[in-house]
Image: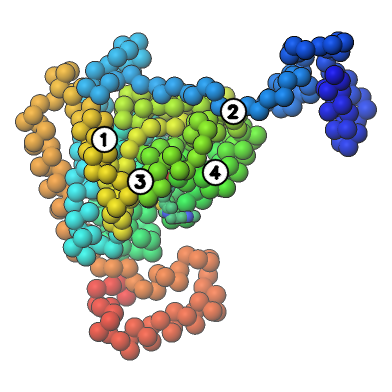
Amino acid sequence: MLRGLRLSQPFLQRSSVPVNSFNRLRVVNHVKSGISHRCKSTEKVLAYPGEKSVFDDKLEFHSTKEILPTYRIMNEDGIIINSEEDPKLDRDTVVKMYRHMVSLNAMDNVLYDVQRQGRISFYMTNYGEEATHLGSAAALKPEDTIFAQYREAGVFLWRGFSLDDFMNQCQSNSLDYGKGRQMPVHYGSRRLNIQTISSPLATQIPQATGSAYAQKMTKSGNCTVCYFGEGAASEGDFHAAINFAATLETPSIFFCRNNRWAISTPSTEQYRGDGIAGRGVSYGLKTIRVDGNDIFAVYNATKAARKIAVEDNQPVMIEAMTYRVSHHSTSDDSTRYRTLSEIEQWKIKHDPVKRLYNYLLSKGWWSEEMETTSRTEARKEVLSALKRAEAQKKPSPDECFNDVYDELTPQLIQQRQEMREHVKKYPQNYPIDQHLV
Ligand SMILES: Cc1ncc(C[n+]2csc(CCOP(=O)(O)OP(=O)(O)O)c2C)c(N)n1
Ligand SMILES: [Mg+2]
């Protein structure tokens, strides 16, 4: 029964552990003749970082036994179920949150249709996930850096990205900060501390860890918040990023929007174990799972996470449970792989916007009349921003070649010349008069 000793000795012989470190090895002394019962010791096997394992003479494979709970403080009807947890946000703040939800819905309605009319090439809506955006964004400081995936338009709205900014980007016009070089919904803003979105999934996660590490090194007192979907969390980049954040002890908040779908792949086929929150724990991150459709729970969780990140220089994981109510994008038809009744159930029973609406009604801070007016106004504002954006010229095609390097390389100069000649030769295919020169 010298299992502990037998297991440990070869390890130590192979390793380069200095001799004086041998005293860290605690051989569990449970050698007894005729032992039949399980023997556990309170002594440690070895001091591995982050792990306290004891010797155990029973052969047993382990799996997740404890499922992390889901933090919630407001129920489906907009009633606060635990008044001690109520963040007691003032009327202006809650109304502002709600108004942004209304604007977000209006923008999604209009731009989805605008894509269908062929006036923009692509769009992704945010329906069903509004509370994850506004609850988290409201709990951050404007100086905190944000890395988003693509379905976080409400975070941009809260930060001050205007409807004109959204429309200019989706129209790829000359006022777009990205100079028309990205697909629609790939927003970004240096002024608002939001890194530009990029299409390859999960690339933002290690970048966000790097950003947080830089904040730590410069003692900035801020954190980096990284949003991603549960599908993106299957990428290798996710694991590398979280492990670096854990070991470098960075002021990071990893915010997973678990909306149950990654295009047509349901969460049930995406992972095993206790989901993304379970991974946070296993990587050594302080972790919380939260009802993503409860804006106050999301707000509290993000606020507390920010405190841990900034004050203790520790990364935090938040898994927000929500649902992608619409199609993945305008290139998708989700009724091909999920039932209408599933979608309806989420729309009717778990709608985060309705939940906040009911809360506002119960406080006397909103009315049916205000609802109608604000929805009409929001649509009008979106449409006029769209009109302004459509009236703008497109960027000069030369912009394709700028900003890659500090100065154009000879190859790029040659390619730009070829492009100019090509465009001139086929004016019927290139409405160059719509572009800046
Ligand atoms: C590296 C990479 N692989 C695949 C894709 C195609 N793709 C775009 S979005 C997406 C699903 C992502 O799902 P999730 O992270 O859950 O975000 P959600 O769309 O649900 O918000 C996939 C597979 C991609 N953009 N990049
Ligand atoms: Mg998803």
> Percent from the top left, x then y, of residue 223?
50, 34
Separation of disc 2 and disc 3 at Cα? 33 Å
Relative to 164, residue 121 above or below: below
The answer to whether mark 3 is within 8 Å of ligand 1 is: yes
Report crowding for label 1: few under 14, some 14 to 19, many 20 or more residues within 10 A (C-alpha). Answer: some
| Residue at the far left in the pictured view | 369
- The amino acid marked with disc number 4 is Phe
Separation of disc 3 and disc 4 at Cα? 17 Å
Mark 1 sits on what residue?
A: 346
> Percent from the top left, x then y, of residue 427?
27, 85
Task: Looking at the image, tell me whether mark 3 or mark 1 is earlier in sequence order.
Answer: 3
Task: Looking at the image, tell me whether mark 4 or mark 2 is earlier in sequence order.
Answer: 2
Separation of disc 3 and disc 1 at Cα? 18 Å
Q: Nearer the viewer, mark 2 or mark 1?
A: 2
Split into 4 quadrants, where in the image is the N terminus? top right
Horizontal relation, residue 132 to residue 216: left or right: left
Report crowding for label 3: few under 14, some 14 to 19, many 20 or more residues within 10 A (C-alpha). Answer: many
Task: Looking at the image, tell me whether mark 2 or mark 1 is earlier in sequence order.
Answer: 2
